[in-house]
């Protein structure tokens, strides 16, 4: 295989076996699903880390059940991101903001009162319909050069295009960037928010590896990708959301561009920390977590304790399927999203139930598959009157709260 950014040779970094698409929940335990390899590759030339096997768009999104949750943590993050964008004049009251992969439009709804216009584009039919019902104008389509032509004809040029936790969800980022450069004028900004490779490696977040995440971006690889399209980074900000995310601010290259000192600072930090030794430890820790968590769950089940997972998440499905946990070890998965309830997790066949059902018959242990919302989940469970269930946190290392 070759690097899908620079076309150089790549080598295998980590092989997690096979798994179905992580957000494709089953309607019944008997439903047959195909599984696909989860193999991570690395390019020594540009630093790109990518998934070897990319599924086509239809396979990923035909049974797509991820809905951005209404969460206190996410609301605070939206405030943080909005404040950063306005403080630096990347957003103003006159801005037309277009978001790629806008889901049900929660972020656009957050900034809508403070800008001139918002539009979303998302390929999932049901999700797009929900966004439109909530008053966020959303086009149901994949974003690429062809759809950017239609968007430009219909809405004009946005001042800012946002791609939050979706830019890595396509096998050919060059195709998306061609759409971005077509839509933006020379002063327009492209804001990419993604899980940050350095955090993924340092925090042992191997569960971030699933079929939607086809790329694992670093500053080095993002610079290489943007340069091919005559774009560059003008700012960077870090965020703790989702286990550690990075916000890239990019634009078409111009001699007048002012580059924030943050770009140089974070580039130097990455060069010092994202080393071959760091990748080696990441791989070793992945196998250590698999062994430790597998033995812990088996020991608890053999002892007669009940275990539920909390969060019907994509990362949770990577974790469960890599370790080999099923409905034989885990009785239920608890999730607050009505669309997911009554369905079954891919491959593991664990039934998804509501938080209310869980409160009626709480388990001895919750395995936090949505560990990025750990504090919020623990507080919610305790406030419901459940002071007995304990919490197994799998990342960055296995421990019990």
Image: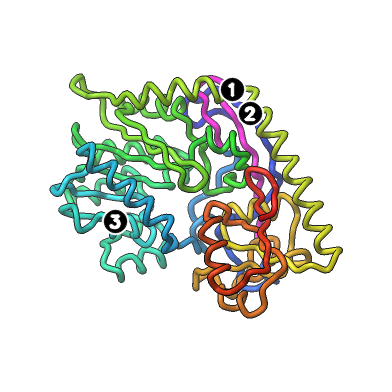
Asked whether residue 401 is drawn in magenta, I would say no
Corner quadrant of residue 334: bottom right
Boundaries of the magenta span: 33-50
Mark 3 and mark 2 residues within 8 Å of each other at the beta carbon = no
Looking at the rendered structure, which numbered label has been put on residue 279?
A: 2
- x then y, percent, for residue 326: 74, 62
Q: Quadrant of the N terminus?
A: top right
Real-space Cα separation, disc 1 to disc 3, in angstroms? 37 Å
Q: Going from the N terminus, do you reach mark 1 or mark 3 first?
A: 3
Give the mark count: 3
Mark 1 is surrounded, within 10 Å at the Cα level, by few (under 14), some (14 to 19) or many (20 or more) other residues, namely few
Q: Say whether residue 74 is left or right of residue 63.
A: left
- Report the front residue among 36 and 263: 263
- Report the front residue among 295 and 106: 295
- Report the front residue among 211 and 112: 112
**Which residue is depicted at the point 36% across and 29% down?**
226
Which residue bears the numbered disc 1?
275
Which residue bears the numbered disc 3?
108
Mark 1 and mark 3 residues within 8 Å of each other at the beta carbon = no
- x then y, percent, for residue 98: 26, 50
Q: Say whether residue 117 is left or right of residue 13.
A: left
Mark 1 and mark 2 residues within 8 Å of each other at the beta carbon = yes
Corner quadrant of residue 306: bottom right
What colour scheme was applied to this rendering of the protein?
A: rainbow
């Amino acid at each position: 295989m070759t690097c899908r950014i620079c076309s150089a040779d790549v080598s295998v970094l980590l092989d997690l076996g096979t798994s179905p698409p992580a957000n494709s929940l089953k309607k019944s335990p008997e439903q047959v699903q195909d599984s696909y390899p989860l193999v991570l590759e690395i390019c020594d030339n540009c630093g790109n880390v990518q998934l070897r096997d990319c599924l086509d768009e239809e396979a990923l999104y035909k049974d797509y059940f991820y809905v951005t949750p209404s969460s206190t943590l996410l609301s605070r993050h939206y405030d943080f991101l909005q404040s950063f964008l306005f403080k630096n004049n990347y957003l103003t009251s006159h801005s037309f903001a277009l978001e790629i992969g806008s889901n049900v439009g929660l972020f656009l709804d957050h900034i809508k009162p403070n800008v001139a216009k918002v539009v979303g584009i998302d390929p999932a039919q049901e999700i797009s319909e929900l966004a439109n019902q909530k008053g966020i104008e959303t086009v149901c389509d994949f974003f690429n050069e062809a759809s950017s032509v239609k968007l430009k004809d219909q809405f004009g040029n946005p001042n800012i295009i946002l791609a939050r936790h979706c830019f890595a969800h396509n096998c050919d980022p060059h195709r998306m960037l061609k759409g971005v450069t077509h839509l933006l004028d020379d002063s327009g900004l492209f804001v990419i928010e993604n899980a940050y490779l350095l955090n993924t490696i340092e925090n042992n977040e191997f569960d971030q590896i699933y079929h939607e995440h086809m790329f694992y971006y670093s500053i080095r690889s993002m610079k290489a990708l943007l340069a091919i399209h005559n774009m560059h980074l003008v700012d960077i900000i870090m965020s703790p959301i989702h286990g550690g995310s990075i916000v890239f601010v990019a634009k078409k290259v111009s001699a007048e561009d002012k580059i924030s000192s943050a770009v140089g600072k974070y580039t130097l930090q990455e060069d010092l920390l994202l080393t071959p030794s760091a990748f080696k430890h990441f791989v070793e820790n992945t196998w250590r977590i698999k062994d430790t968590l597998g033995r812990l769950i088996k020991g608890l089940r053999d002892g007669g304790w009940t275990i539920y997972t909390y969060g019907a998440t994509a990362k949770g499905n990577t974790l469960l399927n890599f370790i080999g946990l099923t409905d034989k070890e885990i009785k239920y998965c608890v999730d607050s999203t009505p669309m997911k309830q009554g369905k079954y997790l891919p491959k593991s066949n664990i039934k998804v139930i509501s938080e209310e059902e869980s409160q009626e018959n709480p388990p001895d242990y919750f395995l936090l598959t949505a560990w990025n919302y750990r504090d919020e989940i623990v507080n919610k469970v305790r406030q419901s009157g459940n002071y007995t269930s304990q919490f197994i946190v799998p990342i960055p290392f296995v421990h019990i709260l």
